[in-house]
Image (cartoon, rainbow, N blue to C red):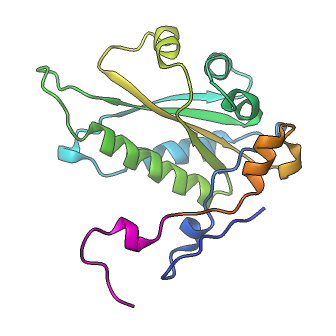
Amino acid sequence: MKKSAESSAPIHPLLAERWSPRSFDKSAEISDIDLTAILEAGRWAPSSNNLQPWRFIVAKRGDAHFETISKHLSGFNAMWAPTASAYILVGAITVNEDGSARPLAFYDAGLAGAFMTVEANHRGIAVHQVAGFDRDAVGAEFDLPAHFSQIAILVLGTQAPADHLQDATLLEREKSPRVRLPLTQLVISGLPTL
């Protein structure tokens, strides 16, 4: 299923075609080459002062990390995400070694997540980013330090037909059109006139 963005000016097809499916092929696997390339894309994202605050926990379906993350997903995420091929938990180191704050750590980690999403889509791998999971439980399971903030989990896999979803609410969300606020509501000042 495709859901092309309706934009006021043409954008790159990788961006126009990107959306967040919930229906994944539970038999599809992600190759180590693809997964490594996706991580490399995140590694090469821009970062403030080149601090590279992002950190990743990688889990492939069938391994212990995947099971650990799956059991701490919340809400609807627990219903559909475990059918995906892999997870990448994106987090950020939020303080420097001297204890001072890294105010752009979340922004930088978001860029890394975006770069990984684009690389995955380039490789034909669908990505749905989720924030619904028990951060305290995941932190304890992976023995994460206090200065590591868990931001989101990238759920990666091969898209399956929407009707693979058994829940009616999820199926409706899967089939609904993509919508975004218009630029006139997003650009505070300086919107170009076409």
Question: Which residue occupies the foreground of this view, 45 or 163?
Answer: 163
The answer to whether residue 24 is visible is no
Placement of 9 over or under 82, stated as above or below: below
- The residue at 31%/78% (across/down) is 191
Q: Quadrant of the N terminus?
A: bottom right
Placement of 150 over or under 180, stated as above or below: above
The x and y percentages for residue 175 are 77, 56
The x and y percentages for residue 70 are 66, 22
The x and y percentages for residue 185 are 39, 68
Task: Locate residue 77 relative to residue 108 in the image: left or right.
Answer: right
When asked about the image quadrant of residue 93, the answer is top left
Task: Locate residue 73 relative to residue 186 in the image: left or right.
Answer: right
- The residue at 61%/18% (across/down) is 72
- Give yes or no for residue 188 being in the magenta stretch: yes
When asked about the image quadrant of residue 53, the answer is top left
Which stretch appears magenta? 181-194
- The residue at 69%/63% (across/down) is 177
Task: Locate residue 150 relative to residue 105 in the image: left or right.
Answer: right
When asked about the image quadrant of residue 49, the answer is top left
Question: Which residue occupies the foreground of this view, 46 or 70?
Answer: 70
Placement of 66 over or under 45, stated as above or below: above
The answer to whether residue 134 is visible is yes
- Magenta stretch, main secondary structure, is loop
